Image: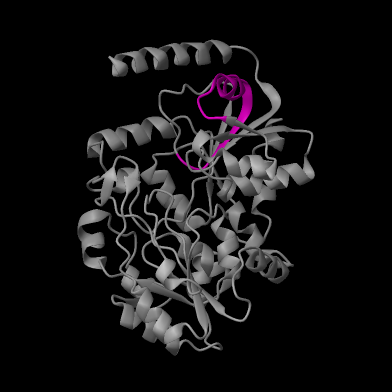
């Protein structure tokens, strides 16, 4: 009975949305959304903040999942609750949508709305139509690819961080409209002239010890490990007790899980050494305060490379991930800009062996970070917002 009622309500909502979208769009209205309305972060945030500073005459709202609105209230950011009646009127009349993940297909994009899809990472693991098999819950390979195809028909612009990504995005998303090869706006902060001052301010705000170096552990999610649709598990393979024993005199470690991972780690036993910042919205701020990164197959390492700081790849399940879960676009073991390790002991050894004067992999930097210069948001705004005002 409830499912029938839900279907009826969705149908009525859709009809109302389509009706409202028949009215002329509000030319100065922009709607932003990051990770399904869960965060104030990523490329949409960088574009929003650039617009707010340089073009404050625009009317800008964030689309927010009601469960995550507290952060927007605290920051004083204009927002609307996702799928509310107010949200419907704003989305249906907005001239621009700026989004970094997929929108629900039952929301009909108005013909006169310009949809800027920023996406959220340089691809290492296979995407969309390039995936051989989809292991996520609640869908099939065929359905997943069809839904992705239908969604990408709505995109008018797609941001690409580099030429490598452009080629993959066009094929994997089957996208044939305008690609903006601009670098990622979210990485502008990594090239800010005052980034060290910004980092010190963030570190104090997060109450991290100022006399310790910071390790950032930011792994991705596993398609085949989940509690339910949209809620993924991650067994913490990193031995925090060993890390504290061997490195605690010099380092602290901060954990930042993928937004799809549902874990809440109890770090009470590691108080003063390990911190869970998975709910910290903007990972770019965590990059800035970190002296080195531990990750696996997450696209975070492409962004972190902008800082030319050390990286370790804790790839304990690499064979399974490569062969059965996703697969890679290039030979990860040969091309990763840092050592691949499979145990906590190897992680510790890699950290101890880092040399401060060791040069970063310049070939990797030139291939993936060559467009990043602190002005990506500016380029995107000029190409999309200002050209279509």
Q: Position of residue 180 (x, y in %)?
A: 57, 46
Residue furthest toward the front?
A: 268
Q: Considering depth in this image, is 60 or 79 the residue closer to the camera?
A: 79
Relative image position of residue 120 (x, y in whole percent): 49, 50
Q: Residue at x 52, y 57 (%)?
A: 162
Q: Which residues are magenta?
A: 81-101
- Is residue 327 shown left or right of residue 278? left
Residue drawn at (65%, 20%), measured in percent from left and top? 25
Where residue 385 sits: x, y (%)? 68, 36
Q: Is residue 55 left or right of residue 16?
A: right
Q: Quadrant of residue 102?
A: top left
Quarter of the image for the C terminus: give it.
Answer: top right
Viewer-side residue, 130 vs 231: 231
| Quarter of the image where the N terminus is located | top left
- The answer to whether residue 65 shows anywhere in this view is no
Percent across and percent down for residue 141 are: 23, 39
In the rendered structure, the answer to whether residue 286 lies left or right of residue 381 reads: left
For residue 305, above or below residue 227: below
Query: Which residue sits at x=46%, y=23%?
Result: 107
Is residue 323 rendered magenta in the image? no
Count all numbered tags in the image, as a single digit: 0
Report whether residue 152 is seen: yes
């Amino acid at each position: 009975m409830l499912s029938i009622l839900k279907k009826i309500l969705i149908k009525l909502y859709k009809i109302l949305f389509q009706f409202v979208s028949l009215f002329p769009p509000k030319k100065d209205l922009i709607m932003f959304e990051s990770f399904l309305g869960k965060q104030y972060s990523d490329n949409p945030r960088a574009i929003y903040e650039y617009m707010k500073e340089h073009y404050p005459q625009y009317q800008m709202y964030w689309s927010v999942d009601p469960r995550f609105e507290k952060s927007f209230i605290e920051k004083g950011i204009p927002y609307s609750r996702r799928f509310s009646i107010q949200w419907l009127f704003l989305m249906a009349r907005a001239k621009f949508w700026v989004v970094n993940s997929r929108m629900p297909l039952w929301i009909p994009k108005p013909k006169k709305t310009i949809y800027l899809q920023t996406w959220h990472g340089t691809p290492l693991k296979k995407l969309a139509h390039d995936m051989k098999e989809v292991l996520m819950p609640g869908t099939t390979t065929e359905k997943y690819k069809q839904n992705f195809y239908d969604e990408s028909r709505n995109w008018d612009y797609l941001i690409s961080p580099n030429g490598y990504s452009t080629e993959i995005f066009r094929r994997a998303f089957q996208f044939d409209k305008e690609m903006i090869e601009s670098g990622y706006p979210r990485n502008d902060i990594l090239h800010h002239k005052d980034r060290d001052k910004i980092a010190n301010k963030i570190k104090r705000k997060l109450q991290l010890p100022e006399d310790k170096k910071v390790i950032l552990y930011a792994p991705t999610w596993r398609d085949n490990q989940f509690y339910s649709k949209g809620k993924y598990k991650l067994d913490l393979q990193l031995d925090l007790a060993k890390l504290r024993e061997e490195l605690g005199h010099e380092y602290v470690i901060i954990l930042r899980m993928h937004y799809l991972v549902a874990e809440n780690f109890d770090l009470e036993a590691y108080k003063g050494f390990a911190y869970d910042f998975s709910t910290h919205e903007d990972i770019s701020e965590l990059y800035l305060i970190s002296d080195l990164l531990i990750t696996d197959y997450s696209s975070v390492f492409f962004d972190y490379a902008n800082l030319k700081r050390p990286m370790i790849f804790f790839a304990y399940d690499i064979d399974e991930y490569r062969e059965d879960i996703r697969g890679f676009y290039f030979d990860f073991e040969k091309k990763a800009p840092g050592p691949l390790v499979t145990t906590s002991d190897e992680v510790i050894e890699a950290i101890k062996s880092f040399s401060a004067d060791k040069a970063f992999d310049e070939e990797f930097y030139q291939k993936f970070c060559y467009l990043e210069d602190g002005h990506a948001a500016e380029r995107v705004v000029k190409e999309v917002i200002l050209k279509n005002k």
